[in-house]
Image: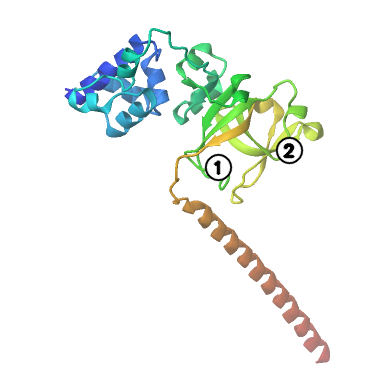
């Protein structure tokens, strides 16, 4: 049996559907970076809503937390403003940038051409004029392979690269999002299409080795235009420092190994000289 806070939260989701701000519960879940099946359980009364989910929903959909926790006030923060505004119709900005959150990365690699899947993803706009024309995507950064340029939790806004002409469209040493079979990666790219029809994918974190992918394995390429970082990100990215220490240890071991080999060679020469004198 769900509590009263969960009941009010469910009412807000139904109201968002009624206002046509979301098309489905799945779209809502992806927008707030929440697993769709878990949200479905909440809507069916099998589990209660979490504080983190309420926080994300209030930030993204302007749900009024006062209403959620007390039942007082408007359901949405902007409702009072809308009720008191003039009779002029509200003109919404054109939604140009489709946001693909971490929860949708796996599905995107298989369904990026499926209009039903794409409609469930949230779209938004940015004030910069260049984002008002063209095709754009926003992806979440996962992992530490692009540190210190990009950290986990960052978002990148990307423009679509012409799939019919990767050779001239992909420039060396720029950062791209590549959609592959079953995976989505963010790498600095070296274009080797003319040489052997491959792309060399490089990480900014030296712990990760470069690798190549065949051009026919790439479904889409998106050029990273802008990164969006959390305000004052936590300095807990200690893995990169650990990787650097490992590299230093490897170099030390290699130097010691070389020194031991040189010493062995010197000892063998001395032994040979002693044998020749006997």
Residue 47 seen: no
Which residue occupies 30% across, 13% down? 14
What x and y, as percent, mark residue 230?
A: 46, 40
Instruction: Give me the residue at 62% from left, 44% from top.
Output: 203
Q: Residue at x 43, y 11 (%)?
A: 90
On screen, residue 61 versus residue 117, left or right, reads left
- Residue highlighted by disc 1: 150
Instruction: Tell me which numbered mark, 1 or 2, is placed earlier along the sequence.
Output: 1
Q: Position of residue 164 (x, y in %)?
A: 73, 20
Provide residue 40's location: percent of width, then percent of height. Answer: 31, 20
> Residue 96 sits in which quadrant?
top right
**Quadrant assignment for the N terminus:** top left
Mark 2 sits on what residue? 172
State the residue at coordinates (18%, 26%): 70
Q: Which mark is residue 261?
A: none
Q: Residue furthest front?
A: 86
């Amino acid at each position: 049996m769900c509590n009263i806070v969960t009941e009010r939260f469910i009412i807000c989701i139904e109201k968002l559907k009624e206002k046509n701000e979301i098309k489905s519960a799945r779209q809502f879940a992806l927008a707030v970076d929440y697993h769709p099946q878990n949200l479905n359980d909440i809507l069916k009364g099998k589990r209660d809503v979490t504080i983190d989910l309420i926080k994300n929903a209030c930030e993204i959909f302007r749900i009024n937390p006062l209403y959620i926790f007390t039942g007082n006030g408007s359901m949405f923060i902007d409702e009072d403003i809308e009720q008191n505004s003039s009779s002029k119709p509200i003109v919404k900005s054109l939604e140009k940038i489709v946001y693909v959150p971490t929860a949708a990365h796996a599905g995107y690699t298989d369904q990026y051409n499926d209009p039903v899947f794409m409609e469930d993803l949230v779209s938004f706009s940015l004030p910069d004029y260049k984002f008002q024309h063209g095709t754009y995507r926003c992806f979440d950064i996962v992992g530490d392979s692009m540190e210190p340029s990009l950290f986990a939790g960052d978002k990148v806004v990307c423009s679509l690269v012409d799939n019919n002409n990767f050779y001239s469209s992909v420039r060396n040493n720029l950062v791209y999002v590549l959609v592959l079979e079953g995976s989505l990666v963010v790498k600095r790219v070296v274009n080797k299409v003319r040489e052997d029809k491959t792309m060399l994918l490089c990480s900014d974190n030296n712990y990760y080795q470069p690798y190549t992918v065949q051009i026919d394995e790439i479904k889409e390429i998106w050029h990273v235009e802008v990164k969006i970082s959390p305000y004052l990100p936590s300095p807990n990215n200690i893995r990169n420092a650990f990787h650097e220490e490992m590299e230093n240890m490897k170099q030390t071991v290699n130097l010691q190994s070389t020194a031991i080999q040189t010493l062995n060679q010197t000892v063998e020469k001395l032994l040979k000289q002693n044998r020749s004198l006997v």
